[in-house]
Amino acid sequence: MPSSPAGTSWKKSAKGLDFGNHYGYINSVMAANSRFAVATHLCAALANAKAGEPQCSKYLASSVNTHPVVVRRIMADLVKAGLVKAVPGKLGGFLLAKPAAKVSLWDVMQAVDEAKVFAFNPNPANPECPVSVRMAKALRPVFNQVQSSVEAVLRGQRVQDLVQR
């Protein structure tokens, strides 16, 4: 575990490292976005269901262990992207719009996330700092390489692959 600055305490918690109170404000570790993981889970659950049998958001939510509203919000993005069909009515729910073998994980990622692995610091560079003025240029090729690798891996994986594992 890294050493902590004077007056702070870093401890391991269920959410990762807790950086405690540092310089008068609370630091927290940014949580990773889980929308892609949940959307992929939902698509796999639909692929695993009996053909032509819509799955309701309550059932899907129990599979993911979340609230049905979370499922419906993610499903709205998947419907908009043409990956899932919404079936209205009392016996309605959701179906995959295409065979699971035709849905790549990259398709799912694009439907629910920004599809960018990393984002640059949104704050302007500090012109007084030699590191700050060079950071975006230094990171750009690294970010591009990682993005290309992630896209290639996700394009090569299908929802059907997950169901068959």
Image: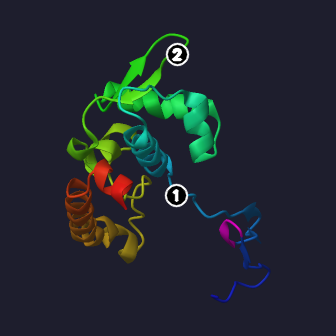
Q: Is residue 30 left or right of residue 92?
A: right
Inspect the image, locate mark 1, and give the three-letter code of the amino acid beneath it.
Answer: Ala
| Image coords of residue 67 (percent x, y) | 65, 36
> What residue appears at the point 77 percent right and 64 percent down from the top-left corner?
24
Q: Classify 10 Å Cα crowding around label 1: few (below 14), some (14-19), many (20 and above).
A: few
Q: Is residue 69 above or below residue 114?
A: above
Q: Nearer the viewer, residue 162 or 37?
A: 162
Q: Classify 10 Å Cα crowding around label 2: few (below 14), some (14-19), many (20 and above).
A: few
Q: Is residue 162 left or right of residue 20?
A: left
Residue 17 shown in magenta? yes
> What residue appears at the point 57 percent right and 59 percent down from the top-left corner?
30
- Residue range of the region highlighted in magenta in the rendering: 14-18
> What residue appears at the point 37 percent right and 32 percent down from the top-left corner?
78
Residue 27 shown in magenta? no
Q: Where does label 1 land, which residue?
A: 32
Q: Is residue 81 above or below residue 135?
A: above
| Image coords of residue 149 (percent x, y) | 22, 66
Image disc number at residue 91 = 2
Inspect the image, locate mark 2, and give the three-letter code of the amino acid beneath it.
Answer: Leu
Q: Quadrant of the C terminus?
A: bottom left
Q: Nearer the viewer, residue 23 or 54?
A: 54
Reading the chain from its start, which is encountered first: label 2 or label 1?
1
